[in-house]
Image (spheres, rainbow, N blue to C red):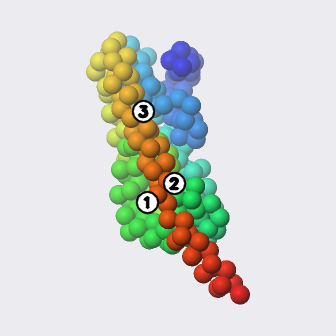
């Protein structure tokens, strides 16, 4: 993985950093925790400036969340409620939960996007509820850019400051990111096990009665 990232950066330069960060957001095969510290390290060799590294990483990351935003916007609250009614247990959502979540996001959307962009895994997924809630695109891009810039700058500066010891950065950041991902998976399993199926059945029945 490390060799591939190096190859892309050496072949495409600053553009390669943006490309890797774009792909990391579309489908995260390569974590930003590897890309940006290595890019920061590369800048210490004089191949590119640290400012260009951060700018490219931020732009690539920002472009990568736009398709997810439009996916959520296309899905919409109505379709999401249908999915919740049908697959509520696995989504750990009842249709009424979708309504509450949508309202919460409309109230706290900017804050949720900004903070979400700083959390591994959530960084990409936060774009979906933003689209579902029809958060204005301009506002979404501004807060996504701020959160993305903070994240990419933090990782790039770690690699830049530690120079050839950038492997140390990966050694610390990687386990933290993995711990967050594990915590999210455990929480998801807990939600499935404790999900109120009775509530879901009642809402399905109410929906069916409303159609007749």
At 53% across and 15% down in the image, what residue appears? 3
Give the labeled residue for mark 2.
192
Give the labeled residue for mark 1.
139
Mark positioned earlier in the residue sequence (1 or 3): 1
Classify mark 2: helix, strand or loop: helix
Q: Nearer the viewer, mark 1 or mark 3?
A: 3
**CB atoms of marks 1 and 2 within 8 Å:** no
Rendered-image quadrant of the N terminus: top right
Q: CA distance from mark 1 to mark 2?
A: 33 Å
Rendered-image quadrant of the C terminus: bottom right
At 41% across and 54% down in the image, what residue appears? 113
Q: Nearer the viewer, mark 2 or mark 3?
A: 2
Place residue 86 in its image quadrant.
bottom right
Where residue 178 is drawn, which disc sits there? Answer: 3
Q: CA distance from mark 2 to mark 3?
A: 21 Å
Kindly tell me whether residue 133 is visible in this rendering: no
């Amino acid at each position: 993985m490390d060799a591939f990232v190096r190859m892309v950066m050496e072949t495409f330069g600053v553009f390669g950093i943006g490309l890797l960060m774009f792909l990391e957001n579309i489908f995260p095969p390569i974590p930003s925790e590897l890309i940006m510290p290595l890019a920061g390290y590369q800048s210490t060799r004089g191949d590119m400036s640290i400012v260009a590294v951060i700018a490219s990483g931020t732009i690539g990351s920002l472009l990568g969340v736009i398709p997810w935003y439009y996916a959520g916007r296309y899905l919409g609250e109505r379709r999401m409620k249908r999915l919740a009614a049908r697959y509520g247990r696995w989504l750990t959502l009842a249709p009424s939960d979708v309504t509450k979540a949508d309202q919460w996001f409309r109230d706290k959307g900017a804050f949720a996007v900004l903070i979400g962009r700083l959390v591994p895994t959530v960084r990409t997924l936060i774009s979906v509820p933003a689209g579902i809630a029809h958060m204005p695109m301009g506002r979404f891009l501004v807060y996504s850019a701020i959160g993305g810039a903070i994240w990419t700058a933090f990782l790039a500066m770690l690699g830049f400051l530690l120079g050839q010891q950038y492997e140390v950065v990966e050694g610390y950041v990687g386990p933290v990111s993995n711990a967050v991902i594990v915590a999210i998976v455990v929480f998801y399993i807990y939600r499935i096990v404790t999900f109120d199926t009775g509530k879901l059945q009642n809402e399905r029945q109410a929906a069916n009665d409303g159609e007749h």
